[in-house]
Amino acid sequence: MTSTFTRDGVSAEVVERIRERARFARLETVRLIEIAKTGHYASSFSAAEILATLYYGVMRLRRGEPHWPDRDRFLFGKGHAAVALYPFLADWEFFPAAVLDEYTRLGNPLGDHPDMRIVPGVDFSSGSLGHALSAGLGMALGGRLQNREFNVFVMLGDGELQEGQVWEAAMSAAHHRVARLIAIVDRNGYSLDGRVDDVISIEPLTDRWRAFGWECHEVDGHDAEALLACLGSVATDDSRDRPAVIIAHTVKGKGIDYMERDFGWHIGYLAGTDRENALSTLEQHP
């Protein structure tokens, strides 16, 4: 598959598909965490539309071929939200959908954080925050050396930007003009310890990335049409001679009102009627 984005605009059909897949990711997140009895709902919900846009509107992938050499790469810096990614990998037939049903159980490859050694379609083992952009830079440089034209997408949590290694990688990527490296910041405003900017402020965020030599864009991270237009145009811009970052403004826990208001849902468990109410709410979510 090649990107469904074209320079002539975005397809209404693709936008609706992205919305449906984002809803699917949230519903599957609840289902899979029910198996594990604990998990990262809120971090997964904030990233749902971004992931859906990448996997169903932008990235070049081949169904059933997770190791296709010319595929676009995706590194999930905030790997604790992998529960929202696994259903997409199964949908792309990178592993049987039945594997999802034993999520986190003994012997199952799907854990709370993704492991590239045992999960087909996972390009980087992540969850130890701060390392993904460096690894993505290495992959993009490797692609350049091999004369391959794949893009490398790296999603970072905004709290992850408090890690110094992120900025070392950002500086190096700009210096080497690695245009096929595209970072996406899930700017939901919260980390495990509370508001990101109360812990260590990362603002002014766009100015900081630009100062490091990156092309910078901002977008509503829950607007499927805007995401497809932004990510698609960046991914297909052959004239760019430097890395690009998209700051996606999102809501942690998007889709469940009380999760949106309480950062304590960074990790938790929905039981009984709470789970049923959450599923009912998400099924009606636009």
Image (spheres, rainbow, N blue to C red):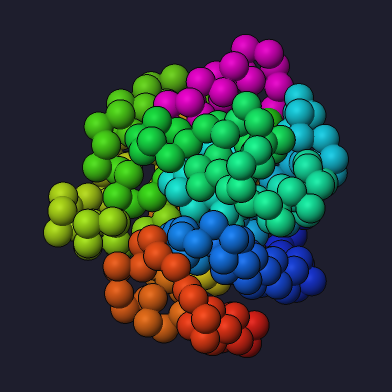
Relative to 228, does residue 85 appear above or below in the rendering?
above
Magenta span main SS: helix
Side of 270 relative to 18 (left or right): left
Residue in view at x 71 percent, y 22 percent: 148
Residue 247 visible? The answer is yes
Residue in view at x 52 percent, y 70 percent: 222
Side of 113 relative to 62 (left or right): left
Residue 140 among those drawn in magenta? yes
**Range covered by the magenta-colored residues:** 133-149
Residue 126 among those drawn in magenta? no
On the image, the x and y values in percent for residue 149 come to 70, 27
On the image, the x and y values in percent for residue 170 come to 36, 31
On the image, the x and y values in percent for residue 21 come to 69, 66
The one of 256 and 9 positioned closer to us in this rendering: 256
Residue in view at x 32 percent, y 44 percent: 160
Residue in view at x 56 percent, y 25 percent: 140
- The quadrant of the picture occupied by the C terminus is bottom right
